[in-house]
Image: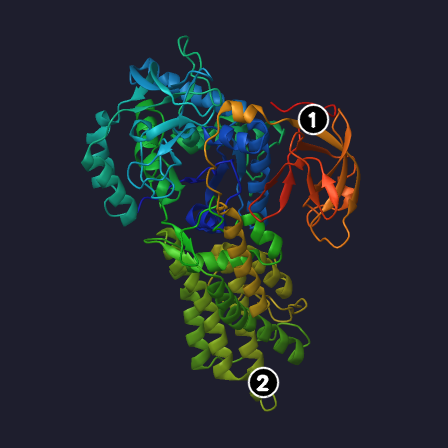
């Protein structure tokens, strides 16, 4: 394996169109954070880069849904997502934004380099256009019936019901989401990247050079794409929102979001070194010291062959990070290529695919709100069940079980026993070690081996295996205490107990070093209990991290049990959320027999104002209303008493049929009918004008 001088590690840029769920954490962010924390602990030169992906059609789509601007959407979700990452211990050196000017400039520079080298082709094709809105329609602005499953609300690029990938012209009865009109085909010009020209190079670079070191799921998907034959892909789009195409004849066109998004890693690195060298910090949060840094140092992290580039992503981004982005970098000619792209599969939830749009998800911010003191519990549960080679599943019962039976009963229990026994027998100071017995020597040998085994797993991107290694180290400590039984030995041989607890505390100190990579908040607590400064990976495996007489801090519980009622509440919350997202189906009354316009024109429908209202005696349904119709003041009996109080009705505008023949009810003549509508839950709603009008205004 090649030794590298430095590492550039990226985590997929989350799309800033909504909150992100724990499946995203399992896909890219927790594994990348563990990898980077290990490299930092090992003293490696590493830069950890991420940021918000803020272009593409989904941003203005979300703005329409929330009745706001695209800028407001990206500002809102950039902050929400980044705050969640921080609270969950994801330690980026910079979390940037693709809406920043430096990203626009970087993307345009790379596009122009490819254009000026003659590596882009200019093509005219027919695309859907909305005549009323006067815009070309991106795929997500077109809906229609899916030709494969019949879903009437499929998008122009995908049916979210059956999961099929589509093109807009495959949709049956397509409509514009902007105006609801059927789109027309118009010619438009775009610039294409001819992916097929790089097939030979990809076969050499991926299928030969990385056949043994890339994960099987990543290699397999790449091979499938290459074997099927690549085609040219447009690198521009007809949109208002995005990075302008830097050509004189490209009015109204922006860069394809999957052209500019991966370049976000490069622009974020440029921004990082600009900020730390100028001292004008906006996004950079360096997790270590970058000595003698210069603004141009970004190039060493992207252009020096001695730098190892690793992309952490989910499986839905494999083609972009393994084929399209590397082709862009290769075509440009000045950039290094990814050494590895350890993409994970999907994490499902309680037996179903995780989906924010269907309400079947646990959003990061929801978890933090409900478990603010348990970021490491989520980290551990996701790591122990990562979808590394196939889809995995998160369940709340497994979450509870891993917390109670592993974090509490194994790791937390060992740390607590070692500290409490030392506090009890040795005045809370590390005891001296005496003559070692075979059981001690065996434990010390195992202690030295554990960090090496864990490191090897991390370096090969086997994070589930590495996490199991952490827990095995805690098991080693528990087993050692169970075998030596210091609580029984102390009465007859205090010195022997001193040796046992000295070794147990050395294991605890090692758990703080190794644990910081996986469970940073808990590792910090262990160090506080041991009164020990954080140490690096080079110290892991040592049985001499704590000197005799070293004073310890106060013992405390590292983790707490999670009770059944807490889990039941989460399950109910999940099902309630899903139900709230399901479309409401209402039994609609069939249409009445057809009437002519002349029949309809006979109705005198007016807006009136309620002057007085009172309940009818001996009736639960009727209110007696006095209504100003503009022509007269009349009495109308209305069966709305179970939905409106008399006090609520006074002063309201109502719509009524004013020329309905009078009808006597309970001895009172009703002179008209107030019009109402019944919603899905059976509640009556008044039909009212959107703005105040004069009594007597005619509805036509």
Vertical placement of 601 versus 366: above or below?
Answer: above
Nearer to us in this view, 552 or 218: 218
- SS for tag 2? helix
Earlier in the chain: of badge 1 and badge 2, it is 2
Vertical placement of 222 versus 689: above or below?
Answer: below
Select label 1 or label 2 by which is in front.
1
- SS for tag 1? loop
How crowded pointer 1 is (Cα within 10 Å; few <14, some 14-19, many 20+) is rated as few
Vertical placement of 3 versus 249: above or below?
Answer: below
Q: Are marks 1 and 2 in contact (CB under 8 Å)?
A: no
Residue 113 x %, y %? 36, 17
- Whether residue 335 sits left or right of residue 294 in the image: it is left
How crowded pointer 2 is (Cα within 10 Å; few <14, some 14-19, many 20+) is rated as some
The image quadrant that residue 246 belongs to is top left
Q: Could one spot residue 293 in this view of the protein?
A: no
Residue 309 x %, y %? 38, 38
Q: Could one spot residue 363 in this view of the protein?
A: yes
Residue 18 x %, y %? 52, 39
Residue position marked by numbered label 2 in the rendering = 487
Of all residues, the one furthest to the bottom in this rendering is: 492
Which residue is painted at 63% across and 75% down in the image? 420
Nearer to us in this view, 9 or 225: 225
Mark 1 to mark 2 CA distance (whole Å):
81 Å
The image quadrant that residue 7 belongs to is top left
Residue 29 x %, y %? 47, 46
Which residue is painted at 26% across and 24% down in the image? 232
- Whether residue 121 sits left or right of residue 607 in the image: it is left
Residue position marked by numbered label 1 in the rendering = 691
- Whether residue 201 sits left or right of residue 411 in the image: it is left
Nearer to us in this view, 413 or 14: 14
Vertical placement of 369 versus 473: above or below?
Answer: above
């Amino acid at each position: 394996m090649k030794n590298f001088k430095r590492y550039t590690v990226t985590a997929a840029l989350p799309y800033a169109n909504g909150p992100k769920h724990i499946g995203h954490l399992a896909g890219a962010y927790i594994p990348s954070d563990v990898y980077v924390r290990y490299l930092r602990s090992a003293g490696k030169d590493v830069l950890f880069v991420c940021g918000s992906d803020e272009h593409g059609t989904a941003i203005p789509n979300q703005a329409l849904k929330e009745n706001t601007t695209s800028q407001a959407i990206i500002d809102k979700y950039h902050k929400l997502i980044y705050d969640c990452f921080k609270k969950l211990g994801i330690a980026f050196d910079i979390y940037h934004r693709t809406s920043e000017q430096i990203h626009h400039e970087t993307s345009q520079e790379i596009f122009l380099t490819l254009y000026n080298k003659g590596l882009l082709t200019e093509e005219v094709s027919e695309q859907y256009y909305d005549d009323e809105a006067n815009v070309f329609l991106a795929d997500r602005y077109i809906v229609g019936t899916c030709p494969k499953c019949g879903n009437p609300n499929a998008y122009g690029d995908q049916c979210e019901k059956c999961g099929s990938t589509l093109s807009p012209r495959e949709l049956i009865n397509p409509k514009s989401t902007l105006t609801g009109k059927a789109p027309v085909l118009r010619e438009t010009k775009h610039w294409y990247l001819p992916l097929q020209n790089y097939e030979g190079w990809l076969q050499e670079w991926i299928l030969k050079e990385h056949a043994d070191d890339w994960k099987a799921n990543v290699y397999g998907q790449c091979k499938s794409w290459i074997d099927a034959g690549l085609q040219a892909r447009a690198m521009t789009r007809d949109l208002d929102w995005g990075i302008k195409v830097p050509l004189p004849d490209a009015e109204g066109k922006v860069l394809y979001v999957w052209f500019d998004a991966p370049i976000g890693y490069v622009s974020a690195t440029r921004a990082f070194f600009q900020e730390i060298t100028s001292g004008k910090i906006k996004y950079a949060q360096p997790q270590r010291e970058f000595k003698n840094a210069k603004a141009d140092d970004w190039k060493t992290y992207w252009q020096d062959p001695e730098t190892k580039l690793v992309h952490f992503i989910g499986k839905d981004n494999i083609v972009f990070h393994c084929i399209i982005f590397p082709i862009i970098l290769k075509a440009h000619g000045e950039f290094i290529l990814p050494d590895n792209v350890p993409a994970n599969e999907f994490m499902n939830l309680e037996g179903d695919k995780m989906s924010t749009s269907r309400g079947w998800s646990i959003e990061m911010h929801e978890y933090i709100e409900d478990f603010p003191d348990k970021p490491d519990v989520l980290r551990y549960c996701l790591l122990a069940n990562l979808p590394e080679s196939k889809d995995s599943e998160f369940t709340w019962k497994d979450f509870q079980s891993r917390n109670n039976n592993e974090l509490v009963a194994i790791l937390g229990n060992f740390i607590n026993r070692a500290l409490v026994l030392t506090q009890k027998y040795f005045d809370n100071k590390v005891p001296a070690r005496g003559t070692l017995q075979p059981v001690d020597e065996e434990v010390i040998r195992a202690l030295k081996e554990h960090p090496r085994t864990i490191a090897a797993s991390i370096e090969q991107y086997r994070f589930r295996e590495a996490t199991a290694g952490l827990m095995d180290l805690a098991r080693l400590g528990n087993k050692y205490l169970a075998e030596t039984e210091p609580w029984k030995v102390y009465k007859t041989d205090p010195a022997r107990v001193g040796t046992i607890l000295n070794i147990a505390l050395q294991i605890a100190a090692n758990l703080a070093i190794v644990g910081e990579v996986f469970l940073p908040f808990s590792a910090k607590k262990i160090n506080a209990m041991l009164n020990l400064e954080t140490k690096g990976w080079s110290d892991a495996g040592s049985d001499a991290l704590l000197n005799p007489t070293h004073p310890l801090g106060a013992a405390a519980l590292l983790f707490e049990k999670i009770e059944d009622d807490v889990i039941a509440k989460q399950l109910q919350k999940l099902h309630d959320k899903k139900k709230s997202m399901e479309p409401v189906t209402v039994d609609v009354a069939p249409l009445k027999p057809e009437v002519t316009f002349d029949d309809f024109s006979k109705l005198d429908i007016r807006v009136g104002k309620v002057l007085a209202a009172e309940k009818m005696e001996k009736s639960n349904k009727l209110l007696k209303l006095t209504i100003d119709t503009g022509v007269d003041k009349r009495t109308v009996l209305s069966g709305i008493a179970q939905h409106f109080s008399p006090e609520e009705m006074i002063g309201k505008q109502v719509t009524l049929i004013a020329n309905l023949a009078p009808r006597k009810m309970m001895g009172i003549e009703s002179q008209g009918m107030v019009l109402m509508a019944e919603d899905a839950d059976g509640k009556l709603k008044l039909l009212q004008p959107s703005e105040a009008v004069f009594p007597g205004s005619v509805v036509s």
